[in-house]
Image (cartoon, grey):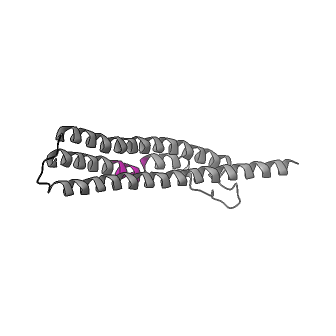
Amino acid sequence: MENILNKDKVNILLNLLESQFSELRRSEEREQVVFQWTTSLLLVSFGALIALSDRSIPLQHPLAIKLLASIMLTFPATFSVVWMIWRVKRSSRNADAVDRIRESLHLYEDGYYGGLLSVYPHYWKNAFAKYIVKRLETKYYIAIVILMTICVVGSLWIVI
């Protein structure tokens, strides 16, 4: 009876591990979609600015247009950046769970699954969560969104 219980425990842990990995993958895919959506919005806005720069007739209420357009560009960009930061924190919690499940499966213990060495190297123990937090892709996305927002909003104030 003990073996059945241990098998059930292992199956539960493996299902939990797969669930955590699936959540991490979905989260990364959503981050990429949010990044693409935000940069597309900024690029389209910049294209519209270029088209407006050739106007020979000045716009009525240029200050109001600049303010509204700045808000319309800054709000989604800020939302994207805040969401990406929140996603990293949430993914870090998922990665912590992955580390705990791996440890519960004894993947770092020498000889547990036969042989002399552990399934995973010892230096991987508790390293997955640190990797997720240090992952550069999100930091690049955030930097690009901030830089593009500054450039497009700055161009808006210069052109209009």
The residues colored magenta run: 134-142
* Residue in front for this viewpoint, 131 or 59: 59
Residue beneath the point at 39% across and 45% down? 80
Residue beneath the point at 22% across and 49% down? 151
Residue positioned most to the left = 56
Q: Main secondary structure of the magenta part?
A: helix
When the figure is inspected, residue 68 is found, relative to residue 114, above or below; the finding is above
Answer yes or no: is residue 160 visible: yes
Left or right of 37, for residue 13: right
Relative image position of residue 86 (x, y in whole percent): 46, 40
Corner quadrant of residue 120: bottom right
Residue positioned most to the right = 1
Relative image position of residue 125 (x, y in whole percent): 56, 48
Answer yes or no: is residue 109 visible: no
Residue beneath the point at 64% across and 47% down? 101
Left or right of 9, for residue 137: left
* Residue in front for this viewpoint, 66 or 41: 66
Residue positioned most to the bottom = 115
Relative image position of residue 145 (x, y in whole percent): 32, 49
Corner quadrant of residue 52: bottom left
* Residue in front for this viewpoint, 148 or 101: 148
Magenta segment includes 112: no
Left or right of 67, for residue 3: right
Relative image position of residue 146 (x, y in whole percent): 30, 46
Tally the numbered discs. 0
